Image: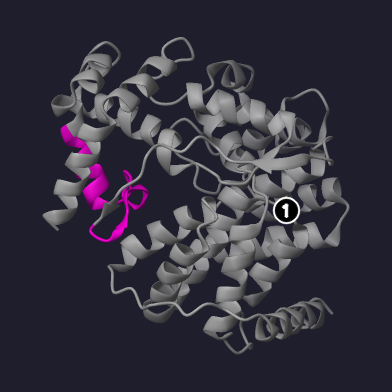
Amino acid sequence: MINAFLSGVRQQVVTEAMARPLPDTPYLRIDTHIAASLMQKAIRRSEIDWALKAGQRLFDVQPARFWRRVSVTLFEDVGLLDKQLALDTLTCAPRRGASPVCWSVAAHLICRLCEATKTQVANNLLHLGLYDLSEAEPMVDFDLLPFADAERWITGNTATTVQRAKAVWQLSGIGCSGQVVQHPEADRERVLSILSGLAGDPVLEIIAREGLRLTGHILPLISVLEEAVSQEKVYVTAAADPMPPEDLIGGLPSWTFDQYTWPGKSALRRARTECPAIAADLESRATTAEQRFRALADAHFEFESANLARRVQIPAHTALWRRVQALGPHRLPENAAALYEALRGDWEAYQALRSSAVENL
């Protein structure tokens, strides 16, 4: 029955895609790693032309990677404000026994993801679960609890949403490491069952399962948890985040190159010592070169790479986002603003370093 339902959804998307005229997309011959970065950031910024150019390159050369990146982007940067969009996207990804969809269908979905109102709430919950000590302290002995007691952190009403998300993370065992300790009885199927009961919506259960199948990431489960427990279902018009100035570097937008690309990482490493305002700020907050890099890279990601052109204006989501901007490796609420100010002050110098790194590829 589920397969028949998914086939019906898939066919509807194909029909809609065939009726939608798409712009001609000049073929972009770039490295697939760069293409994946460009596509995701273009979706965040609702830059349809760039998203289509990068997406077509990735779809053509590495289709499996294309669908995984689209699915991760859905949960990380778009969210479940439009459950039909989420279901349509996941249904069109490769499935056993189903023929692959053509580029026109994939392009149609990219356009819809660009046009959607977006939230990064799931990613923000994970970030705070990692770095907010006030959220972590009450859960210090979480991994010592029997599963049934640990489950109450998810199903009860006393834990914060960050703590409930961290409980899902630890009980699922998906990607647990470092500051997130896997519960000894971790069982993703039991966690999926818990979320299904909380959501009370079969579509959300499908989204959780399909999202997990395609990404192997905890993000789909956190997205469904947040949707299930959220009290704010009505939101006002989306608004754009402040965007720092952009340049074309090697024919691509400068925001393509963040810490997860080689040129972006190289420029950030040089910025630690070659950009005076950044260097002075980092010297005051971290003791090793690697710590200074982590502080800068994490702040830069929030400053430029994580920006959304259509961010939903839900107060609870905005509050989490503001907390994320002030928390991260070697960054505290009381000094976070200084690092952002240093980035603004040295922006032209940093762009020059980034341009140099791209030219040396």
Please tell me in which quadrant of the rendered image residue 337 appears: top left
Quadrant of res 20: bottom right
Chain part drawn in magenta: 250-270
- For residue 347: magenta? no
Say which residue appears at 72% left-offset and 29% top-offset.
316
Q: Is residue 254 magenta?
A: yes
Question: Relative to residue 90, is residue 25 depicted above or below?
Answer: below
Quadrant occupied by the C terminus: bottom left
Mark 1 residue crowding within 10 angstroms, few (<14) / some (14–19) / many (20+): many
Residue nearest the observer in this picture, 338 or 309: 309
The answer to whether residue 94 of the structure is visible from this angle is: no
Name the residue tied to disc 1: 192
Foreground: 170 or 198? Answer: 198
**In the image, farthest residue toward the left:** 360
In the picture shown, does residue 133 fall above or below 22? above
In this rendering, is residue 227 above or below 131? below
Residue 194 in percent (x, y) is at 78, 47
Residue 175 position in % (x across, y down): 49, 47
Which residue is at a point 41% across and 12% down the rendered structure image?
335
Q: Say whether residue 78 is visible.
A: yes
Q: Position of residue 97 (x, y in %)?
A: 63, 88
Left or right of 136 on screen, residue 194: right
Task: Point out residue 189 in the picture as x, y percentages from the top left corner.
Answer: 69, 56
- Identify residue type, mark 1: Leu
Q: Is residue 349 left or right of residue 116?
A: left
